[in-house]
Amino acid sequence: YHVVPSTYTKVAHRDSGTDLGTSAEGSTLTSTYAAYISKTQPADSYIGQVIYTLVHPASEEPLQPHTATSGCINYFANASSAVGEMGCQPITNTATIATLWASNFKRDGYGFAGWSDKYDYATNTNVNYYGPNETITFTAGQYTGSNDGLSLYAVWIKSAGTLQNWDGCDSLTQGATTALTDERDGNTYAIAKLADNKCWMIENLRLDNTAELSSTDTNNPSLPITNVYDVTNPTTSNHLSAPTDPTTTVWCTSGSHACIDQSMLATNNTTIFTINTASNYSASNNVYSYGNYYNWYSATAGHGKYGGSSLTAQGDICPIGWHLPTGKNYAGDFGVLDKALGGTGTTSDSDTTPTGGTMSKAWRSYPNNFVFSGYLNGSSVYGRNSGGYYWSVSGYSNNINVYYLYFTSSFVHPGTDNSYKYRGWMARCVAGTLDN
């Protein structure tokens, strides 16, 4: 006989009985197997007729609860195959509000959908979900003194396919989530159907400069993309090229028009695990959830350049079948989402009024999951853990500015403010065709 392990992952088809499918992963199962053997049937006729395949997942352990240290919000990866560490987010006796830290965890083949207050969120019906930078409130002293701290667990969604040409948005209900993998580099992203009834990536894009771009996998790329834009002597490249270490290489002099068309794909998460200890982690240090910084030229795959700036860039580095959001006013993608979340903006081109701190919390709440990822200017990062900066494809009416989503804890400009194209900001992709 064979000893059957108590935890297993189903890898074979089962023709009869209850098919547990992927829900069997990590579970404990007691089964009795029996077969009727006929005296008149040749013994060898049974060979290969009944096959059970149970495989013990050596790399994954069953989920379990963890106790947080008093006076701390402790974050747990909630999967033994996840990598990364996070330390104690301090809570004082008088604290009643906290902005959660963005995730420093990565799990191949899974999208990160936020935090939960239950380790068994997949089967527990009494679960609270939070965005990675969501603001939460609690009673003063609730997690300090002789009390345990607050334990939060990473919520993982296994990839259900590829991002490229995905057509599953209509089948999702509002607020529902899934996860899809970018076939260009293998990164998996959590996806949600948000309040505007559009499907958004709810993680920042992490495409780096090793991925080749083509019209079959990227939204209308303009190739070749140059590393440093020079019309008299262009450097040709079939992918986005950039300094490997943006902290030591100054790719652009602040404010210089010569830098605007430089392809910059500087990324903080390529060095995420150089400071990979819980004691060194902080809200503004290397954080996986912050994603990669792109200037507008890179974010629009070369379509957004110096000059002609009031036009909408017709291509970007989102996967094919996805696009960067539109901006300019409350009729753009950012503005429509803001109104769906409770904002009060109008569709007038002149309406650039920001919404307040309540809307900032809404943007950062689950499942919207926008984060205070800051921006890159020259070789320095600014505003991590205090400001969110996200590209639109909508140029402003001058040569060097573009509309963008900008928010702090106090206000939100949902694609209605404008700033410099040469800065490094974040990218979020929306499913479907670009709506001009």
Image: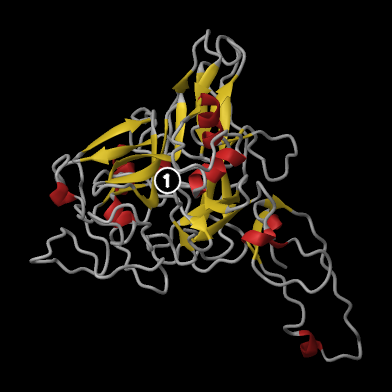
- Which is nearer the eye, 131 or 318? 318
Residue 44 placement (x, y as % from top left): 77, 89
56 sits left or right of 50 in the view: left
Is 413 above or below relative to 18? above
Residue at 15% x, 48% y: name it: 257
Residue 131 placement (x, y as % from top left): 54, 36
Q: Residue furthest left?
A: 232
- Which is nearer the eye, 298 or 255? 255
Is 209 above or below relative to 220? above
126 sits left or right of 381 in the view: right
Residue at 53% x, 36% y: name it: 363
Mark 1 residue crowding within 10 angstroms, few (<14) / some (14–19) / many (20+): many
Regarding residue 59, the answer to whether it shows in the image is: no
Residue at 27% x, 66% y: name it: 239
Tell me the quarter of the image containing the N terminus.
bottom right
Q: How is the image coloured?
A: secondary structure
Q: What secondary structure is marked by label 1? A: loop
Q: Quadrant of residue 242?
A: bottom left
Residue 240 placement (x, y as % from top left): 26, 61
Residue at 36% x, 27% y: name it: 279
Q: Quadrant of residue 68?
A: top right
- Which is nearer the eye, 119 or 52? 119
Is 207 above or below relative to 285? below
Is 89 above or below relative to 48? above
Regarding residue 91, the answer to whether it shows in the image is: yes
Residue on which disc 1 sits: 328
Q: Please tell me how many numbered marks the rendered image carries.
A: 1
Query: What amino acid does circle 1 point to?
Result: Lys
Residue 301 placement (x, y as % from top left): 32, 61
